[in-house]
Amino acid sequence: MIPRQQFALGTLARSVALGAAAVSMLAFATPVSADTLRVVKHSALRVLDPIMTTAYMSRNHGYMIYDTLFALDENMEAQPQMVDSWTVSDDGLEYRFTLREGLMFHDGAPVTGEDVAASIARWGERDAMGQLLMSFVAEMGQDADDANVFVMTLTEPYGLVIDSLAKPSSNVPFIMPARLAANTPSTEQVPEQIGSGPFRWVEAEFQPGVIAVYERNPDYVPRDEEPSWASGGKVVHVDRVEWIVMPDDQTKLNALLAGEIDYWEDASADLLPILQADPDIEVANLNALGYQTIMRPNALHPPFDDARIRRAAILSVHQQDVMDAMIGNPDLYMLCPAMFVCGTPLEASVGGEALVEGNGQDEARALLAEAGYDGTPVVLMHPTDVSTLRTQPVVVAQAMRDAGFTVDLQAMDWQTLVGRRANQAPPAEGGWNMFITNWVGADVFNPIVNNMVGGQGPDGGWFGWPEDAPLEELRLAFAKAPSLEEQQQIAEQIQAHVYEQGYYAPIGQYFVMTGWRSDLEGVLDGPAPFFWNIRRAD
Amino acid sequence: MLGYILQRILAAIPVMGFVALIVFLLLRLTPGDPAAILAGDAATPEQIARIRAQMGLDDPLWVQFFSWIGGMLRGDFGVSLLSGTPVLQMIASRMEPTISLAVTTITLSVIIAVPLGVIAAWKQGTLIDRFVMLLSVVGFSVPVFVIGYVMISFFAMELRWFPVQGFRSISQGLGPFLERITLPTLTLTLLYVALIARITRTSMLEILNEDYIRTAHAKGLSETRVLMRHALRNCSVPIITVIGIGFALIISGVVVTESVFNLPGLGRLTVDAVLARDYPVIQAVILLASLVYVVVNLLIDIAYVLLDPRIRYR
């Protein structure tokens, strides 16, 4: 005979099991189409205009629905994308771009030279590389006789026209309809999501902070070449891509392991061993240039209004310490003094040797003594809510203290930092002395896109605001340099100068791994995540 | 009764107005700049200033406040500063997961907790009572995210009975809805069972020592009748209060549970909006939470009147 309690427990257990089984039998009603790619990105998509903002999620959104005139391949060489052919006049002043046949916006309108001109003009208002390009442009527009031709006339020869149009990261010169580009200021968001790219935006299913949905653009005509980074044939093999927002790393891991998602863009470093141990998961670094983490002093206020003290702060830091604390796994970082990123044609070590060797403390102390540093506290902003930014300030602060600095490490959330760093007032009045941030390698890989090597000062310069006319001349010389060799030479001069003046320093280069279900084939690498070329294995 | 309800609704208006003012001022005093967030990392201060002007964020505070209040009175809660999506639409899309979780959690908790509390009080000092109290301590002590991860690990990853995450609207079918709401419900239920069972037990113990209970026993009424008719009904006021407050707490956001199970509810909307300094969204969500508390309190008070004749006659 079964005792009463045991019977009751057994009944309870059976009831729970039956209930769960019933629920899981009902669950068959939620299949996900094999043609849907379910992706978890590094953040939520909120701003839908990749020209108005430099946010990476907006850039990624741009790559889905828009196309570009040119795009970089894996050798970092610009390749035509929307452009079929182009000519440059003998004097180097006139560029004529003929668009590929059959290019069409998602609203059915053909892409014309007028659309290109309006889009490039809007991008040129907002982007640093675009602004420089525009400073050389006398006029641009659609060819009078052929709507498929876009003509750009320069005031003087400029070596970076094609490189500018192939800019791979924020802001990317995406092409949108003239009716939107010409009528929307670059400080406002475009009211419609109409591009000519390989995916179409599904407005009805967009929930900011929850999900963004794209469907295959059946009218897209891909190029014939093999895809390479953002260049080549953008052939879409899935019907639909869902960008699902998940705030919790453990949930992302579980969802990927359980097959509820297909792709996790920024797999958390401490969870990688679990992913790597699962035969159904592939893990790889898809962005060879990785990320650069940097320290940026404010040149407007003491003590960093003195170049020797800025330089002392940089010399005090050892990249190894920063990377060990921040990343830990040596496979996921490298020590790199190159301002224009290790692994690019402009890689150089000049001026940054001490950062890698970790032997700059003595020189830092000597510089502080020479400059008569009086112990003025350095307000170092410390964002504690972003996992990739919360460690470096602690390490840098300690290194600077070891060299003799007084450091006021002020904890705050990232958005407070973002608001405060725009304040040019002294630290005592709400300003600051130093902050640390990270950049995608493609955003800093030459002196034109790298905001930290500018010398425009408080009017127009990037946060930190050093004013340095010779540096601006060097950047201009880089822009006009006709060959890669000359560009490399000038980039090295710029790097040496910036280190000497202590305007900024890279304090490590690190990599973020991506995980995806192993039934996916054709996952592309590049400076941004791309979702064409991916197919599900049979 | 109708007059009482009307009086309470009128009294809620100045409360809501006060909340609106405080929320507005606190947000403007909080460091951070939505324009800088919107512009992105590479923007220069000039570009940020232009965006700020475009959004009206450099208007005087009183202009911004009255513009917001005026909009609300016309039923326009504004748009998200970041996505441009109407705030009401954002809130509406996040209501269903949160309300679903609140309803399933509170319903299940009441079904389990009230009988447990009654039995624990009835069998005070026995093994059953100790078990209920142990359950209560565990429910209070173990963090919700730990319970959530254990649930996912066992029921979703090991047994594969449920999916790991996500939400499906009940309009997409009862199966998909239950499939995804079950684990978060069970997770939160443990906490609320602990709370409600403990309150029920304590209230019952007080009532069971009253003279009229002894009288009921002396009259020869059955144990069930005494417990259900005479004891439970008389201790329902504190239980209803806890249930009401519990419901309001879930509605105003259970961020951890929503994050662990990836439920797109109001809690996550609030946190995201705060981190992004999306003023119109934060203001609207906090006002909504305040309204929920006001309404729940009103309903609790009405329930008091219905359940306790002494209040009715006062």
Image: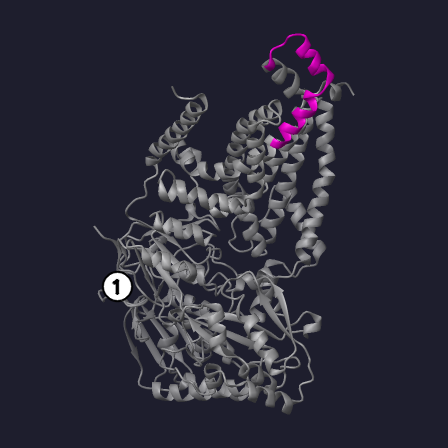
Question: Is B153 located above or below residue A93 in the figure?
Answer: above
* Residue B302 image offset from top left, x and y in percent: 68, 25
Q: Is residue A98 magenta?
A: no
Question: As rendered, which of B203 and B306 lies closer to the eye?
Answer: B203
The secondary structure that most of the magenta stretch takes on is: helix
Q: Residue at x 55, y 39 (%)?
A: B139
Residue B168, picture quadrant? top left
Secondary structure beneath dot 1 equals loop
* Residue B215 image offset from top left, x and y in percent: 71, 12
Circle 1 residue: A233
Q: Is residue B218 magenta?
A: yes
How packed is label 1: few (under 14 Cα within 10 Å), some, or many (20 or more)?
A: some
Question: As rendered, which of A468 and B298 lies closer to the eye?
Answer: B298
Q: Residue at x 62, y 32 (%)?
A: B198
Q: Residue at x 61, y 78 (%)?
A: A401
Q: Is residue B258 visible?
A: no
Question: As rendered, which of A29 and B8 lies closer to the eye?
Answer: A29
For mark 1, name the chain.
A
Q: Is residue B286 visible?
A: yes
**Highlighted range, magenta:** B198-223
